Each structure stands twice: as C-alpha cells, then as structure tokens.
Image (cartoon, grey):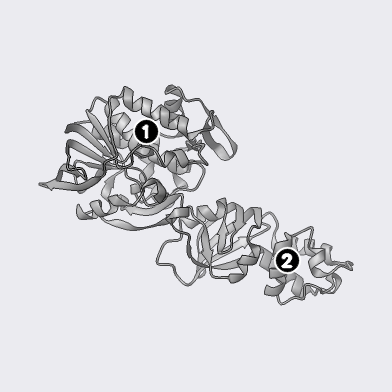
Amino acid sequence: MEYDVAVIGGGASGLIAAGRAGESGAKTILVEKNTAVGLKLLMTGGARCNLTNYIEDKKILASNFGSAGRFLISAFSRFGPSETIDFFNALGLPTKKEENNRVFPRENTARAVLQALLDYLKKSGVVIKAGTAVKEFVLDKGKIGEIILVDGQRVRATNYILTTGGRSYPATGSSGDAYNWLEKMGHKIIVPSPALTPIIVKDSFVAELEGLSREGISLSLFQGRKKIAASQGSVLFTALGISGPAALDISRFIRPPFQDDLILSLDFFPELTGENLDDKLLEIFSGSNKTFKNSLAGFLPPKLISPLARLLALDPEKLANSITKRERRELANRLKDFCLGVKGLAGYDKAMLTAGGLDLREVDPKTMRSRIIPNLFVAGEVLDIAGPTGGFNLQACWSTGRTAGEAAAKI
C-alpha cells in the first residue's frame, strides 16, 4: 500500500490531520487499531464534546498550557478557537458557547462531531483502515521506510503522522504505544503520568469528608515552600483525596516520582482576607449560647466541622462564646490554609489526559515535524502537552493535528 501520507491513530488529532492532508491533495491513509475511529472523542465533555475554549488572544490561550504554551503559539495562530469553530460550522455542525468560554456542538452530542469529521475525511479522499494495529516502524537511512501492521500488511508513505494519544481512557485502547516507537527512533520521552485526574492525599481523615463538594475554592500546590501551581473552582472530597475541576486542573502539575514535601493548600474563603474571616467568626461566636459545632452549622458544611475541631484540638461541644481569640484565629488560618499532603494520583482509568510524552524540543512547532526523523510528524496527546479542563486539550489536538496534516502533505 503506497501513500503520500500515513496517519497512525484515529483520535481527534489524527482525524483532522488525515482530513487536512487529503484535502491538500495528498493520497492519505488513516490506520486505527480499534474497529472504529474516534472512540475517545465520543467520551469527551461528558459525551457532549467540548470542542474548544473560545479565547481570542492566542498568547492568553497558550498560557493555560504552562511551559508548553510557547510551543503551541504557532499552531494556535494558524488554527485557533475561531478557526476551529468556523471549520466545524462549515462542515454543517452548528456550535454554541457556554459558561467559561466553553464551546459545544449545538446538538449536545459528541457523535455529531465525529460524524462531521468522518464526512470530512470521505470528502478529502482519505482511506480508513481500522481494526489493525501497527506492529513496527521500519527505518531506512534515518527515515521511516514503511510500517508493518499486525496482520502482516505493509504501508509505505512519503510522510508519516503519529497521533496515537497517550494512556488515558485505556478502555478505548489508549496504551501509549507511541512512546516505545519514538524511543526506538532516538526520541526522548518525558515520563508519562495521569493528568486531569483525582489527587490522592496522605491524610486519612479525608474519608470523613467523602462526598463534600465546595465551589469557589482556591487550591495551591507547594513543594516545600515553593508554590508550583494554583487553581480555583469546585472541589469534591473523595474517600482517598480530592477531585472536582480545581483538583483535576492542578493534578497535571503533579508528576512522578511523588516528592514527600508536596502539599495542597485549600482556601475555603478566597474572597475574604484572613482578617475579614476572623471578624466573621467573631460575629458568629460572640454572644452565642450554641456549641462550637452548632454555631458553625450555617457557615461551614457539617461534614467539615468535626474534622476541623479535631485538627485544632477543640471540643466541638465547647460553647461558642467561650472560644478564645487564639482558637478563633487558628480556625480562620486553617480555613484559609487547609493543608493536605500529596500521596499520588488516581490511575489512567480515571484520567482525562496524559501528561508527559514526546519532548517538545525535538519537534518543529511550525510544522510538527520531528527534528530527528525527517519524514515523521507528531501531534496531539503524544506530545508533552497538558492543558486544563474546558476544551483546551481538544483545541491543542485540532491545532497540532491540522498543522501536521498540512505540512506532511507538502511532498
């Protein structure tokens, strides 16, 4: 089988890369090991598919990806959120913008997105070969000569695009195959880890808080005294730690090996200064004949009060009007700096994304071409890119995938 472009991996980045290559006039094949393409895409955004996050300023958009942002600027400039929306609208898929700049298909179903992409590939003349995995990349004089499939067939192309994703959503077949292939070709792989996943903490008392959800929490990650990352939003306590949007976003900055001095600090009242919070507590406690736990019942979630009292060595039955100034200030400090020791992360089965992957220094950001293998292009989650929730990571897939497809088609 002879082609101009062979795309390996039928996820979001692979679909748009193959479509763009075919649209640009290249004879293109898309190889997918599952029996159907786009399985992970169907699961994104709660099966609604959060297509992108509509931030017009490309530098602000890129800043959400941390150190990888500089790498993405070029791809975002060519094909950013506006272009993505226009692209899907042109395919006959109306879109809508929701809270926090998130963009969804108007039909509220990821299946409509996948169908639009399949129609795009068909119109672009792309051959889809599904149900067959790649067994081996064969190198010839520093370039890829061909790929051998597990069924024994061989695919030869002028250029190859690797878009097999990471290890998240393993039920869809994501197993990180690309990492071994790339290392054998001489590439460096940044150790992959689950991202956008619940955080496991050392403190056993969090089991008492299981099911407690709190909005508007400010969450910070420290290594010793150094602040590594921060996020704000909803937090959900689990039996082993914390989840929810704020926790998921900050999880991408927690990488193995997990250091003993990694600390999460939760601020339950980021809108108040410590002094203002202390004044509020003084108002609650002053002149109250209620017990400590009962006086706080309307101010704090009931599940939080007993663990707090225990952490502060306070009798929950103590009368509120007998709480000392020191005890009140310690409570205010704890509510502004509720510390949890990080033990690790939930596994790939609960992760929305894989952090780590191909070292970005080995990829040309203008084309997604490998700096080591001249006829190899890489896009999507295989790259060491991890953005927050809310459509950012799909946008990175669309942008890098389309860039790779366009560049690989220029034979």
Residue at x 45% of width, y 31% of height? 113
Quarter where residue 284 is shown: bottom right
Residue tagged 2: 305
Q: Residues within 10 Å of mark 1 (few under 14, many from 20)?
A: some
The answer to whether residue 282 of the structure is visible from this angle is no
Asked whether, in this view, residue 305 is left or right of residue 216, the answer is right
Q: Position of residue 357 (x, y in %)?
A: 33, 53
Residue at x 24% of width, y 24% of height? 25
Q: CA distance from mark 2 to mark 1?
A: 52 Å
In the rendered image, the quadrant that contains the N terminus is: top left
The answer to whether residue 93 of the structure is visible from this angle is yes
Q: Position of residue 56 (x, y in %)?
A: 49, 35
Quarter where residue 12 is shown: top left
Q: Position of residue 287 (x, y in %)?
A: 89, 67
**334 or 179: nearer the viewer:** 179
For residue 188, the mark is none
Placement of 74 over or under 320, stated as above or below: above
Instruction: Assign a secondary structure to mark 1.
Output: helix
Q: What amino acid type is highlighted by mark number 2?
A: Ile
Residue tagged 1: 78
Q: Position of residue 224 (x, y in %)?
A: 50, 70
Residue at x 20% of width, y 54% of height? 184
Q: Looking at the image, tell me whether mark 2 or mark 1 is earlier in sequence order.
A: 1
**183 or 167: nearer the viewer:** 167
Placement of 205 over or under 87, stated as above or below: below
Asked whether, in this view, residue 6 is left or right of residue 77, the answer is left
Instruction: Assign a secondary structure to mark 2.
Output: helix
Depth-wise, is mark 2 or mark 1 nearer the camera?
Answer: 2
- Report the number of discs: 2
Residue at x 30% of width, y 33% of height? 18
Q: Residues within 10 Å of mark 2 (few under 14, many from 20)?
A: some
